Amino acid sequence: MSRLLHCGRHIFDLARPLVMGVVNVTPDSFSDGGRFFDPQRARERARRMRDDGADLIDIGGESTRPGATPVAIDEELARVVPHVEALAREGIAVSVDTRKPAVMRAAIAAGAAMINDVSALTAPGAIEACAGSGVAVCLMHMQGDPVSMQREPVYGDVAAEVRDFLLRRADACVAAGIANDRIVLDPGFGFGKTLAHNLTLMHALPALVATGYPVMVGLSRKSSLGKITGRLVDERMAGSIAAALAAVARGAAIVRVHDVRETVDALRVWQAFAAPGSFSTSQTEQ
Ligand code: 9MG
């Protein structure tokens, strides 16, 4: 039996992995260095990702890379809300990457389908901002905050601590009235984690999947891939695709990526071979 994920007025069947495309409307993102800070380019990028097969587009107005400068509420609202309004009006399922309840409320009013919070709705008023609205929420684990998180993160048992934290946050959301089928969990690769922690978390992903909540994984272009391959940030597409496939093979329901077209192709091929009945062979073979 396949599961459904309700995101505002969008309903996704989780029988196949979903792809979330990343559009950073910041001048200082680690992955695209502010290329989509210009509003016109950001929207063109989002539409292109939709055409390339993205199921959701994640818009972020405050960089969460290690050491990033915090952004004031008014500035984040000005960066994000016009895009949410425009893209949601076109029928795109828009996710908003924010930690601020005021931005969550404005994004939801503008038509956002998901709130993606790297601090798992821990800010006072964040759960209330989302409850009752019909949006989906992505609850991500992070040790520390973006300013300090990569300064020697320490865990006893990283996989158990991440899972227990996320389950506690999911319970808090359910208690506040957010339905189970609107909750996504994310172990937060790279957020207060060393490469060794990230490798352990990937290995342990099935235990997080076994909680029954859809699991999102974001490894696209991250420094762990650079450490494994020796590649710079703009040379990590192959590594990012391999990471997405590794995550989906372990049960991830959503992958958050920069290279949508290539990831969608890779997932289609992987799925056709992994589950041969899922692909119709009635088309001409080449
Ligand atoms: C905003 N952001 C950056 N990396 C991320 C990740 O791995 N997961 C989620 N949910 N958001 C992220």
Image (spheres, helix red, strand yellow):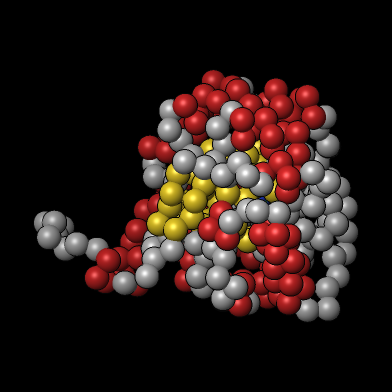
At 82% from the left and 29% from the top, the residue drawn is 72
At 39% from the left and 41% from the top, the residue drawn is 52
Residue 112 left/right relative to 190: left
- Residue 87 shows in the view: yes
Residue 63: image location, x then y, percent? 73, 40
- Residue 162 shows in the view: no
Residue 271: image location, x then y, percent? 35, 65
- The tally of labels here is 0
Residue 264 left/right relative to 121: left
The picture quadrant where one finds residue 207 is bottom right
Residue 54 left/right relative to 100: left
Residue 60: image location, x then y, percent? 66, 37
Give whichever of 122, 154 is nearer the camera. 122
At 59% from the left and 28% from the top, the residue drawn is 110
> Where's the C terminus, which quadrant?
bottom left
Residue 87 left/right relative to 114: left
Residue 195: image location, x then y, percent? 72, 67
Q: In the rendered view, tell whether residue 274 sits above or below residue 75.
A: below
At 56% from the left and 44% from the top, the residue drawn is 134
Q: In the rendered view, tell whether residue 17 sits above or below residue 61.
A: below
> Where's the N terminus, which quadrant?
bottom left
The picture quadrant where one finds residue 179 is bottom right
